[in-house]
Amino acid sequence: MDDLCWVPGRSWVSSAGMPGGSSVHFYGVRGSTPCDGPGIARYGGNTSCAVLETNGHPPIVFDLGTGLRNYGAQLGAAGRDREFRGAVLLTHLHWDHIQGLPFFHPLAHERSRIEVFGPAQGDAPLAEVFEGVMRPPYFPIRPRDLPADVRFRGVGDDVFCIGDARVRSCWVRHTDPCLGFRVDVNGVSVAYISDHGQGCGRDDEPLDHIPTDVLELCDGVDLLIHDAQHTAEEFAVKAHYGHCTVGYAVHVAREAGVRQVALFHHDPAHHDDEVDRLLLSARDASARTGGPEVIAAHEGMDVVLRKRTHAARSVQ
Ligand SMILES: [Zn+2]
Ligand SMILES: [Zn+2]
């Protein structure tokens, strides 16, 4: 895919506060639907959105969930919204992954530009399919009505570049076509698999089966952000939702040799205390089986990525 290389140019806004380093900031960590209430205030109710910032590189945004709105507000407060340049890695077109786009304030400025790499939709261009849900009467404007330049590119099992970042995408199991991503940039690596259907209807495979391409995608990354929607009891009756258990997220992380895994896409029915409990149990399971450090993503969390002192495994 030689043409799949986006060179953001010289005018993108550099990552403030990231001298020589890289980090992932979480703006939305909830799965399925935005939600609210005192019981979820600590982890937050906005849907999927995280941003990889690394010094000297345009931001790379994972998904366009409702958390994207707060990212835009933060950019505005820092005076970084008027000529925003950034790329988006969009896993799929379910509502909880796209609804933040029209509320991303930098797109109100004509000199802003985002490049959205998302799931190829067969013969139809991704932009056309996206517009199918963002148009009257479902929403008053289309993506092309936004003042900023918003471009879509369909990808599947691909390797491409965003500036100096090397990106790998692969199809992962979910209820509709869905991608996972890996980004290698500036000596660090992140994999993002927000929605991942464990088993996903295949009766001939054990439930702990991990597809080879998923293992390759996650191989040795510094941070894996992974679906952790269900308890084992919930999964027993909700396997057809296309998500996985917290235990499966830790299993993938351990088998892929990742450094740290962030539990993500929390079930909207899981209150803060329940997520705390799931985190403790996941940490215990990981420690007992030689797995990686486990964290639970929450809104406002910053994960600082450190370059390894030895050569990290990188995407091939
Ligand atoms: Zn989702
Ligand atoms: Zn989904």
Image (tube, rainbow, N blue to C red):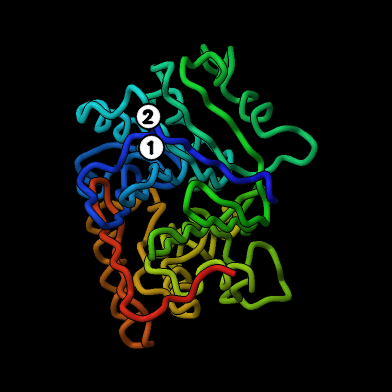
Residue in front for this viewpoint, 75 or 44: 75
Q: Looking at the image, which residue is at 33% across and 87% down?
A: 288
The image shows residue 233 at horizontal and vertical percentages of 45, 66
Residue in front for this viewpoint, 16 or 26: 16
Q: Is residue 83 positioned above or below 9 on the image?
A: above
Q: Is residue 46 left or right of residue 211?
A: left
Instruction: Give the residue pinned by disc 1.
Output: 34
Q: Label 1: state its secondary structure.
A: loop
The image shows residue 212 at horizontal and vertical percentages of 64, 74
Q: Is residue 51 positioned above or below 141 on the image?
A: below
The image shows residue 34 at horizontal and vertical percentages of 38, 37
Q: Is residue 134 left or right of residue 267?
A: right
Q: Looking at the image, which residue is at 42% across and 20% down?
A: 111
The image shows residue 229 at horizontal and vertical percentages of 43, 57
Q: Label 2: state its secondary structure.
A: loop
> For residue 16, what is the image quadrant?
top left
Instruction: Locate the C terminus by quadrant.
Output: bottom right
Q: Amino acid at mark 2?
A: Phe
Looking at this rendering, what residue extends furthest in the front direction?
10
Instruction: Give the residue pinned by disc 2.
Output: 84
Quick one: label 2, few (<14), some, or many (20+) residues within 10 Å? Answer: many
Q: Is residue 83 left or right of residue 131?
A: left
> For residue 158, what is the image quadrant?
bottom right
Does the rendering let one see residue 228?
Answer: no
Q: Amino acid at mark 1?
A: Pro
Quick one: label 1, few (<14), some, or many (20+) residues within 10 Å? Answer: many
Say whether disc 2 or disc 1 marks the residue closer to the N-terminus.
Answer: 1
Q: Which mark is residue 48?
A: none
> For residue 262, what is the image quadrant?
bottom left
Does the rendering let one see residue 292?
Answer: yes
